[in-house]
Image: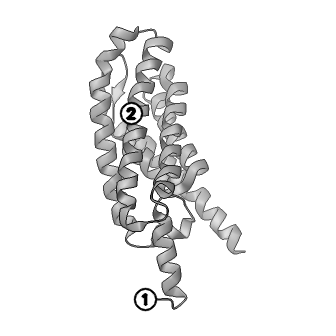
Amino acid sequence: MKNNHNQLLIITTTAAMIALTCVLTMAVRIPTPTKGYLNLGDCAVLFSGWLLGPVYGAIAGGVGSAMADLLAGYPAYVPGTLLIKALMALIISFAPYRLCRNDRKHSGIGFLICAVIAGALMVSGYWLYEAVVIGEGYAAALAGVSGNVFQGLAGIAGSYFLVEVLSRTGSPGTYGVGGFAKGATNESNDLSAGKTGG
């Protein structure tokens, strides 16, 4: 019964994060010279990866962002956005926890390192997508790089704030997620079992 409850919680949270990612992506849209737009969605994408893990996080980040492109009138970007944002969430879901080897004290540094890697993937991914698939050409597609860098930095800052706040409450452990939430989960489990540090 508990497993069914947890699965339902993960599915409903994934649906909520898809909606949040879509809304944040569409809330602020700044057109770029490459016929795309800058947005705040990366914050939700990175947060989804940390909160929901590799599978559901990638689904939330990818699908939510792709839906926003479709609804905003950018259908040519949908396939690229789906792949790029899903990979961003995937990187965040796996890497910080493994990078820090369950060391909660340094896990924030791990998150930032992996968020920068995910951001670099986003910037380079859209540059290639716009150059090759959209047909802007490599030189023309460079016009969108600086905006994507700014968007990536804003997403890293926003998601890091959310992650730091939630990781201190212990509540993300209810989702059984990866990322450095496992540090909070282990601590809360130890407390509930009556275990204390030496």
> Considering only vertical position in the picture, is 142 above or below 47?
above
- Image coordinates of residue 45 in percent, x first then y, are 44, 44
> Considering only vertical position in the picture, is 130 above or below 37?
above
Q: Where's the N terminus, which quadrant?
A: bottom right
User: Label 2's element?
Assistant: helix
Instruction: Please give the name of the residue rendered at 51% of the width and 91% of the height, measured from the top-left corner.
Output: 194
In the rendered structure, the answer to whether residue 190 lies left or right of residue 44 reads right
Residue flagged by tag 2: what amino acid is it? Ala
Q: Mark 1 points at which residue?
A: 198
- Image coordinates of residue 97 in percent, x first then y, are 49, 58
Could you say which quadrant of the image residue 163 lies in?
bottom left
User: Label 1's element?
Assistant: loop
- Of 198 and 150, the residue lying toward us: 198
Q: Mark 2 points at which residue?
A: 120
Residue 97 visible? The answer is yes
N-terminal-most mark, 2 or 1: 2
Q: Which residue lies furthest to the bottom in this view?
A: 194
Residue flagged by tag 1: what amino acid is it? Gly
For marks 2 and 1, give the CA distance: 41 Å
- Of 183 and 13, the residue lying toward us: 183
> Considering only vertical position in the picture, is 173 above or below 33?
below
Q: Residue furthest right?
A: 1
- Tally of marks: 2
Residue 41 visible? The answer is no
Q: Which colour scheme is used?
A: one colour
- Structural crowding at the residue carrying mark 2, measured as other residues with C-alpha within 10 Å and reported as few (<14), some (14–19) or many (≥20): some
